[in-house]
Amino acid sequence: MTKRPFKRRRIRNSNSDVKISTASHDDVEFRAVDLLKLSVAPQKQHVLRLLSVLNDLDSGTYLGTLLSSHEKSLPNLVREKWHDGVVLYLLRQRIAIIYSALYDILREMKDSVEGARPIKRGPKTPRLLWHMIIDDKELDKQLTELVVFLEPGKSDSLKHVRDKLAAHADDSAFSSGLKKLIETSETGMVVRTHSPQRFRAFFVDDIVSKNWEDKAIGPANSADGVNTSVDEMKRYSTHIAEVRSKTADFVYLLFNTYCEEFKLLATEEQSESLRKELQDDLMKRRKKR
């Protein structure tokens, strides 16, 4: 069973003049972490890196939900094209996060666990993160399954996106993408909206998409290839959502167990003080708007 040391508190508005929207986060778990204790906890860097990657995955998902409302503010003529380019960017970045940072961290943790497993521990053996995972059957099981699930070699398509289109702006990817684009169009669009910073080269998005389709998605099964490309993009998104969900479940259990194991949770008073501080800050921000 997943451990739940975090205290669930419902945010309530204590100021009638300040309305706080809590439609999607009205049941929030608050718990303060003692950062001084965390600073000396064993293998803290692995836990912090993992939490950071999960934050990045969450940020990509959050930004994706904002696209539809932002899209409506753009001129109709360029709305869909602009939107498509940003969606593809977020998709590429999340793939890079998953198959670079996330997999590397989990693989390193798994190797350390396996290295520590056969070593006999005495009463004076320092307690490490690896021992905590080994002694918790659910954590051990989830880590193994997550590493297998994320194995990059299982998907050359995702590996290409990570290596050529996300982690690096690869010269060969742009050359081949341009070549494929020219087969269907000899001109490319560049647009700028009223604000000078709102400038985008649509044809470069097209180049990236063409390379993605050619090298990652592969030859289309349909006559025009449109349906195949759309279905493949949906598959990427679905897979990333599943990765995020599985990773969040594992990291939640790992972090809770880690906090309990090494006594990293702050006192109830400190937790309540931090919660009030956050809520006061939110009210101040709303008043300025």
Image (cartoon, rainbow, N blue to C red):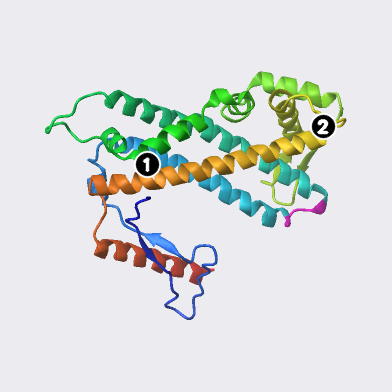
Vertical placement of 159 versus 94: above or below? above
Left-right relation of 63 to 13: right
Residue 232, image x, y percentages: 71, 35
Residue 145, image x, y percentages: 46, 34
The structure residue drawn at horizontal position 57% and vertical position 38%, both measured from the top left corner, is 94
Q: Earlier in the sequence, mark 1 or mark 2?
A: 1
Disc 2 residue type? Gly
The Cα–Cα distance between marks 1 and 2, rounded to whole angstroms, is: 44 Å
Disc 1 residue type? Glu
Q: Nearer the viewer, residue 79 or 102?
A: 102
Residue 27, image x, y percentages: 45, 65
Work out whether residue 90 can be spotted: no
Looking at the rendering, the stretch of residues picked out in magenta corresponds to 72-76
Residue 278, image x, y percentages: 39, 63
Q: Residue 166 is drawn in which quadrant?
A: top right
- Residue assigned mark 2: 225
**Depth-wise, is mark 1 or mark 2 nearer the camera?**
1
Q: For the residues labelled 1 and 2, say whether their Cβ atoms are less than 8 Å apart.
A: no
The structure residue drawn at horizontal position 85% and vertical position 24%, both measured from the top left corner, is 183
- Residue assigned mark 1: 138
Left-right relation of 38 to 163: left
The structure residue drawn at horizontal position 30% and vertical position 61%, both measured from the top left corner, is 271
Q: Nearer the viewer, residue 207 or 210?
A: 210
Vertical placement of 84 versus 176: above or below? below
Label 2's element?
Answer: loop
Q: Residue 117 is drawn in which quadrant?
A: top left
Q: Main secondary structure of the magenta part?
A: loop
Work out whether residue 94 can be spotted: yes
The structure residue drawn at horizontal position 35% and vertical position 35%, both measured from the top left corner, is 46
